[in-house]
């Protein structure tokens, strides 16, 4: 289990990355992001204010299976 509250999962073969948030002891699927903008929208919808400022903060977001802000499969 990750110690960060937000996980951006590995890029899918078809593009995009699943986004989950850990809250109240559970992981909640927020959606599939295809860009930084999508991710920010999901995070704001989950109640995170100023979400664009945490995209590079590894205390908040764990980027799995690819570089941060890489949205397509290699």
Image (cartoon, rainbow, N blue to C red):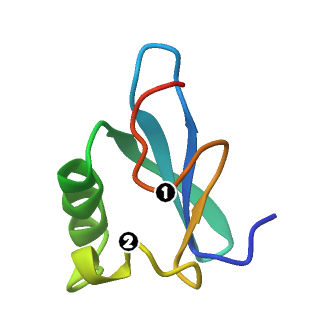
- Find residue 17 and report its horizontal and vertical position in percent: 46, 37
Secondary-structure class at tag 1: loop
Rendered view: 71 above or below 57: above
Residue located beneath label 2 in the image: 55
Q: Nearer the viewer, residue 69 or 40?
A: 69
- Find residue 38 and report its horizontal and vertical position in percent: 22, 49
> For this view, does 1 lie left or right of residue 22?
right
Q: Residues within 10 Å of mark 2 (few under 14, many from 20)?
A: some
Q: Earlier in the sequence, mark 2 or mark 1?
A: 2
Q: Quadrant of the C terminus?
A: top right
Q: CA distance from mark 2 to mark 1?
A: 8 Å
- Find residue 8 and report its horizontal and vertical position in percent: 52, 52
Secondary-structure class at tag 2: loop
Rendered view: 18 above or below 69: above
Q: Residues within 10 Å of mark 1 (few under 14, many from 20)?
A: some
Residue located beneath label 1 in the image: 68
Q: Nearer the viewer, residue 25 or 45?
A: 45
Q: Nearer the viewer, residue 68 or 28?
A: 68
- Residue at 68 percent across and 73 percent down: it is 25
- Residue at 43 percent across and 74 percent down: it is 56
> For this view, does 27 lie left or right of residue 28?
right
Verify CB contact (< 8 Å) between mark 2 and mark 1. yes
| Disc ID at residue 53 | none
- Find residue 59 and report its horizontal and vertical position in percent: 58, 85
Rendered view: 59 above or below 70: below
Q: Nearer the viewer, residue 65 or 18?
A: 65
Q: Quadrant of the N terminus?
A: bottom right
> For this view, does 71 lie left or right of residue 24?
left
- Residue at 52 percent across and 24 percent down: it is 12
């Amino acid at each position: 289990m990750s110690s960060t509250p937000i996980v951006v999962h590995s890029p899918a073969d078809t593009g995009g990355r699943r986004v989950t948030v850990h809250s109240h002891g559970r992981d909640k699927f927020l959606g599939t992001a295809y860009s930084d903008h999508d991710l920010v929208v999901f995070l704001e919808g989950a109640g995170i204010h100023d979400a664009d400022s945490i995209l590079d903060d590894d205390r908040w977001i764990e980027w799995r299976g690819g570089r941060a802000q890489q949205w397509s499969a290699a």
